[in-house]
Amino acid sequence: MNRRWVALVFLCSVMMVSAIAARQAAQPQAKPGGGWTLPPEADTTKNPLTVDAKLLATGKAIFKDKCQKCHGASGKGDGPDADPDAQEDMDLTRADRAAKNSEGVMFYKVFNGRKKPKMPAQKDELTKDQIWSVVAYAQTLRKPAK
């Protein structure tokens, strides 16, 4: 009887630890050092929408309304509400940052935001399709790599 009890307790413990580990693995992970909450698949997530003139026009209009006050009209991070200490991070035109910011990473940065430097989360303000349109537009602001 005592062995059965020990086995039952052991089995329950293993199941609890497995369940906790699975739950933690399923939660979005913060990108080290940046304060961003990005799921593991962020780098490989692709825009599900067809990028065309209409989508870019939608993205530009949303950018003007939601993003321009910090990122600036041309995306250089020089908007009137920009954080002067983080202008380099806010500059969307830098080609050298494109490799670090795939369209999926950009989507989740807009979707989840971060506290510092401040980037308001848009998941409650915009639909996913609207965020994808902003991402598509923001990618047009990048300078070509040299």
Image (cartoon, rainbow, N blue to C red):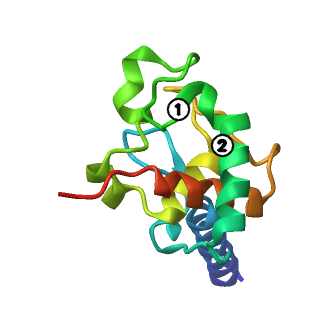
Q: Are marks 1 and 2 in contact (CB under 8 Å)?
A: yes
**What residue would you read off at disc 2?**
63
Figure quadrant of residue 87: top left
- The N terminus - image quarter: bottom right
Image quarter hosting the C terminus: bottom left
Q: Is residue 24 left or right of residue 124?
A: left
Q: Is residue 73 visible?
A: yes
Report the disc number at residue 104: none
Looking at the picture, tell me which residue is in the foreground, 27 or 61.
Answer: 61
What percent of the width, then of the height, locates residue 98? 35, 56
Look at the picture and state if 130 lies above or below 77: below
Question: The residue under label 2 is which amino acid type?
Answer: Phe
| Residue in the image at 55% along x and 62% along y | 39
Horizontally, residue 88 falls left or right of residue 14, namely left
**Crowd rating for badge 2 (residues with CA inside 10 Å; few <14, some 14–19, many 20+):** many
Q: CA distance from mark 1 to mark 2?
A: 9 Å
- Residue at screen point 62% across, 47% down: 110
Which tag, 1 or 2, sits closer to the chain's start? 2
Residue 107 showing in the rendered view: no
Residue 54 percent across, percent down from the top left: 72, 66
Q: Secondary structure at mark 1?
A: helix
69 relative to 128 in the view: left or right: left
In which image quadrant can residue 46 be found?
A: bottom right
In the image, residue 4 above or below residue 114: below
Label 1, residues with CA under 10 Å away: few <14, some 14-19, many ≥20: many
Please state the horizontal and vertical placement of residue 70, each as a whole percent of the image: 56, 26
Which residue, given by chain and number where applicable, does mark 1 sit on?
71
